[in-house]
Image (cartoon, helix red, strand yellow):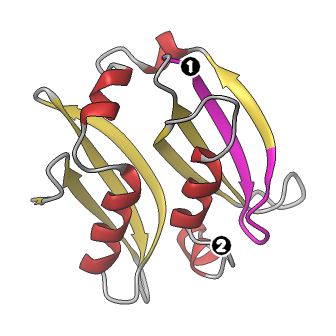
Amino acid sequence: MKEWQAAKVAKVSLTKALMAAEGKGEEKGGRAIDADFENVEGKDPAHYEIKVVYPSGKLVEHYINADTGEVYKTENQPIERYFTRLKPADFQNAKTTLKDALAIAEQKVPGGKAFEADVSKDGSAVQYEIKVAGADNEQTVKVGADGKVVD
């Protein structure tokens, strides 16, 4: 089974997993900046790996079980490796959050379910690239910081 097919049948949506990850941790105001669906048989349960950056600049990766929505593992990440072009303030200042971008991407793919999201820099703003599992394939939708789909 391909990753997008496995993501399509996951009980927990990426949006709900993002909310769980952003709500975790001792610091408030964290924003998800990266999300991946993983379905490695025999190792861990099918899960989402979601990176959250906090206003202090701390970067934490949360692992959320795709069937229960529970955060089962948390790891601090070296922020310098991730932020070569983007700064934590870029995410805090973006009008569109990753969660908003997921909803926009899912609307572009009828019956679609987002399962992976990456962020990059577009000029001086963030841009989200979201993979959506459709009825019979996966599609990539790019959403700008203004919430508009980028062609």
Q: How crowded is mark 2: few (under 14 residues within 10 Å), some or many (20 or more)?
A: some
Q: Disc 2 versus disc 1: distance between alpha carbons?
A: 26 Å
Q: Is residue 125 above or below residue 82?
A: below
Q: In this view, does 95 lie above or below 20?
A: above
Which residue in the structure is indicated by mark 1? 58
Q: Could you tell whether 73 is left or right of 47 in the image? A: right
Q: Could you tell whether 86 is left or right of 79 in the image? A: left
Of helix, strand and loop, which one carries label 2? loop
The percent coordinates of residue 53 (x first, y second) are 50, 29
Residue nearer the viewer, 40 or 89: 89
Q: Is residue 7 above or below residue 143?
A: below
Residue nearer the viewer, 3 or 25: 25
State the mark number for residue 12. 2
Residue placed furthest toward the right: 42
Magenta extent: 57-72
The quadrant in which residue 58 appears is top right
Q: In this view, does 114 lie above or below 58?
A: below
Residue nearer the viewer, 52 or 105: 52
